[in-house]
Image (cartoon, helix red, strand yellow):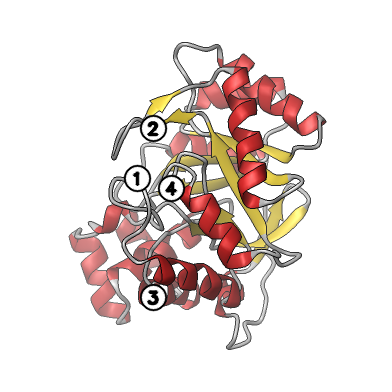
Amino acid sequence: MTPSPTTAPSTRPIVASGTFALGDKEVHRLGFGAMQITGDGVWGEPADRDQCLAVLRRAVELGVDLIDTADSYGPEVSERLIFEALHPYPDDLVIASKGGQLRAGPGRWEPDGRPEHLREVCEGSLRRLRLEQIPLYHLHRPDPAVPLEESVGALANLRDEGKIRHVGVSNVDEQQLHRAMRVTPVVSVQNRFSVSDRSSEGVLGLCETEDLVFIPWRPLDGGTLSSPAVAEVSRATGATATQVALAWLLHRSNAILPIPGTASVDHLLENVAATDLHLSEQQVGSLLG
């Protein structure tokens, strides 16, 4: 998977990241994760609703063409705000959603991979987003109580019915990814990964081999990027730790498409500026440790 270099006009700086294929769509290599446009604990309405709407609109103005969300963010809040801010959607915008998590309260998550549940929440996402088809839909998390093949098979059925265009999986290990790919074609994997959390290195390697897009969630490790190596590269480049961490991800693998999220326009601009930060091989190596 080789990104296509582009020249970045000043009004759409994100195109400096290049593009690659996500299924049958070309997307830029920095997306937007819409989890943080909800309340504390990913629960309820955000503290500043107008600011969150402004962030979504500004992201698209800057060239973001992949926005990641889920029915469980809020729950339902993130998807409703995306519709309010961006509908009618630009032709090149890919909205990725996910299903398979129940919410009982702030910070509480419980997997539910039953086929009937996945169908119900996918159809709910279609209604809230006002889409006839969700471009990319991930299984949010394997459910230990449900065979993975049944959960992934439910998404394959929804794709065959035209309700989703492409299937992805999230929070999987290498064995689970192999099992999912035996059920149906998978175009992307969304796992936790950052400069300080590389527990999914094996999955990333498999994505590179299979030509899948690897979408790291929590790419900034919750804003706790305090390693000496990050601090040193930040001093040397004059970039923020956030920008160094995102630039490292973009340099780490051509398969990676980070989706940093924020409820602040200023932080959004900081994140997008990382696409223009070029790290030397020595700096990339120092961050690998």
| Amino acid type of the residue tagged 4 in the rendering | Trp
User: Relative to 117, does residue 285 appear above or below in the rendering?
Assistant: below
Horizontally, residue 56 falls left or right of residue 88, namely: left
Disc 3 residue type (three-letter): Glu
| Disc ID at residue 43 | 1
Asked whether disc 4 touches disc 1, contact meaning CB atoms under 8 Å apart, the reply is no
Circles 2 and 1 in contact, beta carbons < 8 Å: yes
How packed mark 2 is, by other alpha carbons closer than 10 Å (few <14, some 14-19, many 20 or more), is some
Q: Residues within 10 Å of mark 1 (few under 14, many from 20)?
A: many
Q: Secondary structure at mark 4?
A: strand
Q: Which residue is mark 3?
A: 270
Q: Residue at x 49, y 44 (%)?
A: 76
The residue shown at (47%, 34%) is 202
Residue at the image position 46 percent from the left and 50 percent from the top: 77
Mark 3 → mark 1, Cα distance in angstroms: 25 Å
- Front residue of 228 and 271: 271
| Label located before the other in sequence (4 or 3) | 4
Identify the mark nearer the N-term, 3 or 2.
Answer: 2
State which quadrant residue 267 falls in: bottom left
Residue 169 position, x and y percent, is 57, 33
In the rendering, at what x and y percent does residue 172 appear? 48, 29
Mark 4 vs mark 3, CA separation in Å: 18 Å
Marks 4 and 1 sit apart, C-alpha to C-alpha, by 18 Å
Measuring from the top left, give residue 141's x and y in whole percent.
Answer: 48, 29
Label 4 or label 2, whichever lies nearer to me, is 2
Could you tell me which residue is drawn at 67 percent across and 40 percent down? 187
Q: Which residue is mark 4?
A: 217
Q: For the residue carrying disc 3, how many other residues have a C-alpha within 10 Å: few (<14), some (14-19), or many (20+)?
A: some
Whether residues under marks 3 and 1 lie with C-beta atoms below 8 angstroms apart, the answer is: no
